[in-house]
Structures are given as C-alpha cells and as structure tokens.
Image (tube, rainbow, N blue to C red):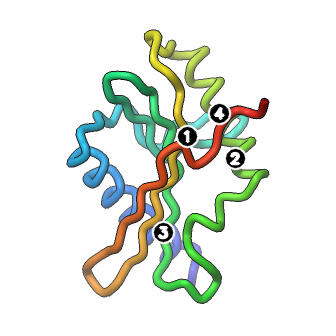
Amino acid sequence: MSPHERQTLGSWGERMAAAYLRQKGLRILCTNYRTPVGEIDLVARNRRHLVFVEVKTRRGTGYGSPQEAVGSRKQRQIIRAAQWYINDRGASGLQPRFDVVAVLRFGDGARIEHIENAFGLPA
C-alpha cells in the first residue's frame, strides 16, 4: 500500500471513529491535534471525561488486529501529547481517559471496536 493509500485509509477510519463516538454521546473537540511530542487522532469529551483517542484502521487482520498496533511506545507518546493538550487548552476539571478505536474496513463498510480506558497514566 502506498503512503497516499495509507493516509486515505487512516483519514477514512478517523471519520468513521468520530461518527461512532458522536453516536455514543461524545462531543469531538479536536481532530489530529499536533504537538512537538506527537499527535492525537481525536480529542473528545463527555460529562466526566476528556477522552484522547487513538484510531487504528486496517483492511484486514493479517498483521494483527488494529488495536495491537498501539504498543507501549505509542501509548507513552499519546500520554505526552495529552499532557501538552491539557497544559495548552486546559481540562476544565474533566478526568483524562485514553481510548483506542479499532476500525476494520470491509468494502464500503466497517467493523468498529471501541476500547475505553485502553491504557492509562503510569503508576
């Protein structure tokens, strides 16, 4: 798959994930939030949580499930970017939460798996 095809698939997955989260009652605050320490695909909120979402999109599971691609290194990067977001924009007293949305594309459709609290701050 070319870099352009990967980017197109990733953007499609992020749109699918955002629509799914909106249906679940979350409000999308930001997409593709970039910091010097990394990027957060989606930032959302509900009444209690400020949700930092990593979206992984795949066309199949030949290389594992999408969520398996969010290893400890990626988790640390997302946590650092989330800390940047909170310092930059404030958290309004909301509890931070780190979710993963795995999107598997099948033709024009998708299977979406939302893993709430997929990882957290180190103890």
Q: Which mark is residue 8?
A: none
Closer to the camera, 65 or 4? Answer: 65
Q: Which mark is residue 57?
A: 3
Q: Secondary structure at mark 1?
A: strand
Decide: few, some or many residues near mark 1? Use Cα within 10 Å; few <14, some 14-19, many ≥20: many
Residue 99 lies, with reference to residue 52, above or below; the image says below
Q: Which mark is residue 81?
A: 4
- Mark positioned earlier in the residue sequence (3 or 2): 3
Q: CA distance from mark 4 to mark 2?
A: 10 Å
Label 2 sits on residue: 75
Closer to the camera, 88 or 26? Answer: 26
Q: CA distance from mark 2 to mark 1?
A: 9 Å
- Mark positioned earlier in the residue sequence (3 or 4): 3
Q: Nearer the viewer, mark 4 or mark 2?
A: 2
Q: CA distance from mark 3 to mark 1?
A: 17 Å
Question: Residue 85: x percent and y percent?
Answer: 57, 24
Q: Nearer the viewer, mark 3 or mark 2?
A: 2
- Mark positioned earlier in the residue sequence (3 or 1): 3
Question: Residue 4: x percent and y percent?
Answer: 51, 73
Question: Residue 123: x percent and y percent?
Answer: 78, 30
Label 1 sits on residue: 98
Decide: few, some or many residues near mark 4? Use Cα within 10 Å; few <14, some 14-19, many ≥20: many
In this image, 44 relative to 79: left or right? left
> Residue at position x 40%, y 57% from top?
14
Residues at discs 2 and 1 in contact (Cβ within 8 Å): yes
